[in-house]
Image (spheres, helix red, strand yellow):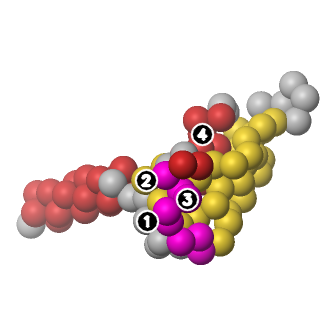
Amino acid sequence: MKTTSLLTGAVFMLLSGAALAAGPKQVDADQASSLQAMGTVQVSGIAGSSDDAAHALKAKAAQDNAGHYQIVAMGNAGDSSLWGGTAILYK
């Protein structure tokens, strides 16, 4: 019984990770020109690197059921390791 629930939990975790990995696709300005915008998302105070902020933007795009997103701003304040960014979401 314990083996079955552990296996079920492991499969669920793998599928959840795969869903986020296969989630919205990042596009550039040229690709976005043919898509319908549906809003923006922002993140701030993300510890780590610009990659961590980009992952946070992708996660927010996935939460909003966006098919695509374009990162339009990314940065950190001075010598801070806290990052922020903005992305436009597309259907």
Which residue type does callout 1 highlight? Gly
Q: Residues within 10 Å of mark 4 (few under 14, many from 20)?
A: some
Q: Nearer the viewer, mark 3 or mark 4?
A: 3
Q: In the image, what residue occupies the spot 73% across and 41% down? A: 74
Which residue type does callout 3 highlight? Ser
As measured in the structure, the alpha-carbon distance from the residue carrying label 1 to the one carrying label 3 is 14 Å
The quarter of the image holding the N terminus is: bottom left
Residue placed under numbered mark 2 in the picture = 25
Q: Is residue 66 above or below residue 29?
A: below
Residue placed under numbered mark 3 in the picture = 33
Which residue type does callout 2 highlight? Lys
Q: Residues within 10 Å of mark 1 (few under 14, many from 20)?
A: some
Residue placed under numbered mark 4 in the picture = 52
Q: Nearer the viewer, mark 2 or mark 4?
A: 2
Q: Is residue 82 above or below residue 55?
A: above
Where residue 68 appears, x then y in whole percent? Answer: 48, 60
Q: Which mark is residue 12?
A: none
Task: First in sequence, mark 2 or 4: give its number.
Answer: 2
Q: Residues within 10 Å of mark 2 (few under 14, many from 20)?
A: some
Helix, strand or loop for disc 4: helix
Q: Quadrant of residue 53?
A: top right
